[in-house]
């Protein structure tokens, strides 16, 4: 019995290893992991596997529902994945910190600067003013206690109109949000070839 279990564990590890390599290869074709573009496939797979262990304290596991999104998340220049309950308040200026992150994952579609976040009281109204691609914008996030307001993300997402990209989400089934900038063709390919349903924000 012990030998059987060890053999099955080895087979499961081999399957996960093959799956992880296939996933890394697939997402690299979609422009992920540009930071490591000089690495060979073998070196990239090794680097990302080690990073996953160090950053998330667990190895790749193809059996997890979140397996593919976890691979995408290894490129933090492409993915924002965080808790929507973010201690939003006047002192923390969460929206001012979030805008540069959304700009960073936009694949060059959004250049954001000159951000100011103003609270008229502890419960708002809240005003977030910023420059995006040379144009000044003003968003009034709805007060959601200490949660990031969905209308804020939706309005930032609309600024991608006119570019090839949109922000897409994947259902985490929790209170966190996964965001990635993709073309429609890329989103359809991810669903078709990887079985991961991503939807426009």
Image (spheres, helix red, strand yellow):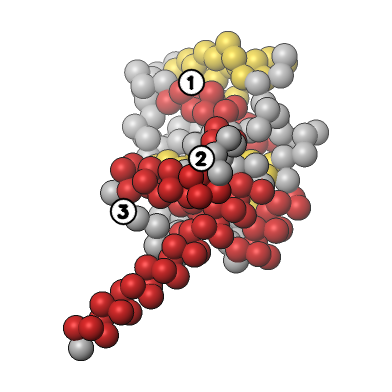
**Residue at the (26%, 77%) spot, across then down:** 6
Disc 3 from disc 1: Cα separation: 32 Å
Q: Position of residue 177 (x, y in %)?
A: 48, 46
Mark 3, Cα crowd under 10 Å, few <14 / some 14-19 / many 20+, is few
Query: Cβ–Cβ below 8 Å for labels 2 and 1?
Result: no
User: Residue drawn at (63%, 33%), measured in percent from left and top?
Assistant: 106
Name the image quarter holding the N terminus.
bottom left
Q: What numbered label is drawn on residue 58?
A: 3
Which is more foreground, mark 2 or mark 1?
2
Q: Is residue 67 visible?
A: yes
> Residue under circle 1?
96
**SS label for mark 3:** loop
Residue on which disc 2 sits: 75
Give the CA separation, mark 2 to mark 1: 22 Å
Q: Residue at x 37, y 25 (%)?
A: 89
Dot 1 falls on a residue whose secondary structure is: helix
Residue 148, relative to residue 189: is it above or below? above
As drawn, is 171 to the left or to the right of 92? right
Per the image, label 2 sits on a secondary structure element best described as: loop
Depth order, front residue of 39/51: 39
Q: Which residue lies at the image location 45% right of the left edge and 36% below the top edge?
A: 148
- Name of the residue lying farthest toward the top: 114
Instruction: Identify the mark nearer the N-term, 2 or 1.
Output: 2
User: Quick one: label 2, few (<14), some, or many (20+) residues within 10 Å?
Assistant: some
Q: CA distance from mark 2 to mark 3?
A: 17 Å
Q: Earlier in the sequence, mark 3 or mark 1?
A: 3
Work out whether residue 72 can be spotted. Answer: no
Q: From the viewer's perspective, is 198 left or right of 122?
A: right
């Amino acid at each position: 019995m012990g030998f059987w279990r060890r053999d099955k564990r080895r087979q499961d590890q081999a399957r996960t290893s093959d799956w992880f390599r296939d996933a890394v290869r697939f997402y690299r074709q979609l422009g992920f992991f540009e930071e490591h573009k000089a690495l060979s496939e073998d070196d990239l797979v090794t680097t990302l596997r080690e990073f996953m262990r160090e950053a998330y304290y667990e190895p790749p596991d193809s059996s997890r529902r979140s397996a593919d999104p976890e691979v995408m998340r290894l490129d933090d220049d492409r993915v924002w994945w965080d808790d929507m309950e973010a201690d939003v308040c006047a002192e923390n200026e969460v929206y001012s910190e979030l805008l540069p992150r959304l700009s960073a994952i936009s694949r060059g579609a959004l250049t954001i600067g000159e951000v100011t976040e103003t609270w008229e009281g502890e419960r708002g109204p809240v005003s977030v003013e910023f420059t995006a691609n040379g144009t000044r914008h003003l968003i009034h996030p709805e007060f959601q206690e200490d949660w990031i307001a969905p209308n804020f993300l939706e309005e930032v997402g609309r600024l991608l109109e006119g570019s090839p990209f949109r922000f897409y989400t994947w259902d985490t089934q929790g209170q966190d949000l996964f965001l990635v900038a993709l073309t429609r063709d890329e989103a359809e390919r991810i669903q078709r070839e990887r079985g991961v349903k991503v939807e426009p924000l």
